[in-house]
Image: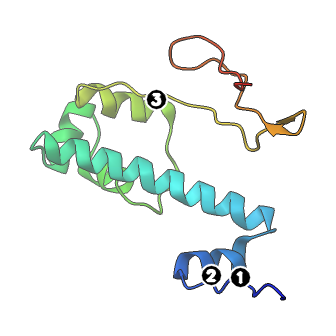
């Protein structure tokens, strides 16, 4: 008996398959957009949790409310580490940068986890 092809019903999966799968430039652009959206959302969430207006946060950072507004905009591309650090300090936080491997390496037919150190400083290794 022949196997039937699996029917895809999830809209996100359909869009991914049609427009992104096998297209590295589009996937890279999608990752960039996700990163910008994540940064903007975190700044907004932290500011609102601290019950601060954009104007008050701007005063604490030493900038204008329009700069804070741009930082909270998902289309903004001008994030600088120094500005993010100033915003984080004004919100009682610090920033962290995390490098994540693009692909997992295969070891002896098995998928291996990243050899980079984990949060506790120890290397993560594949379990046999």
Answer whether labels 1 and 2 touch (C-beta < 8 Å). yes
The one of 5 and 93 positioned closer to us in this rendering:
5
Relative to 11, does residue 56 appear above or below in the rendering?
Answer: above
The local secondary structure at tag 1 comes to helix
Instruction: Tell me the number on the disc at residue 75.
Output: none
Residue reaching furthest left? 51
Mark 1 and mark 3: span between their CA atoms?
39 Å
The residue positioned 66% from the left and 62% from the top of the image is: 29
**Label 1, residues with CA under 10 Å away: few <14, some 14-19, many ≥20:** few
x and y percentages locating residue 65 in the rendered image: 24, 50
Residue 90, quarter of the rendered image = top left
**Label 3, residues with CA under 10 Å away: few <14, some 14-19, many ≥20:** few
Mark 2 and mark 3: span between their CA atoms?
39 Å
**Label 2, on which residue?**
14
x and y percentages locating residue 114 in the rendered image: 71, 29
The one of 94 and 63 positioned closer to us in this rendering:
94
- Mark in front: 2 vs 3: 2
Q: Is residue 87 left or right of residue 106?
A: left
Q: Is residue 43 left or right of residue 120?
A: left
The local secondary structure at tag 3 comes to helix
The one of 122 and 52 positioned closer to us in this rendering:
122
Q: Is residue 106 left or right of residue 45?
A: right
x and y percentages locating residue 37 in the rendered image: 44, 57
**Label 3, on which residue?**
82
Residue reaching furthest front? 1
Residue 115, quarter of the rendered image = top right
**Label 2, residues with CA under 10 Å away: few <14, some 14-19, many ≥20:** few
The residue positioned 81% from the left and 68% from the top of the image is: 22
**Label 1, on which residue?**
18
The local secondary structure at tag 2 comes to helix
Relative to 21, does residue 103 appear above or below in the rendering?
Answer: above
């Amino acid at each position: 008996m022949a196997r039937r092809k699996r029917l895809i019903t999830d809209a996100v999966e359909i869009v991914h398959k049609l427009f992104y799968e096998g297209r590295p430039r589009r996937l890279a652009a999608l990752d960039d957009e996700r990163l910008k959206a994540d940064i903007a959302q975190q700044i907004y969430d932290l500011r609102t949790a601290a019950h601060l207006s954009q104007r008050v946060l701007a005063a604490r950072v030493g900038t204008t409310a329009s700069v804070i507004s741009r930082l909270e905009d998902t289309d903004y591309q001008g994030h600088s580490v120094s500005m993010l650090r100033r915003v984080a300090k004004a919100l009682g936080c610090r920033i962290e940068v995390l490098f994540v491997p693009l692909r997992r390496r295969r070891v002896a037919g098995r998928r291996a986890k990243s050899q980079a150190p984990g949060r506790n400083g120890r290397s993560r290794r594949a379990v046999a």
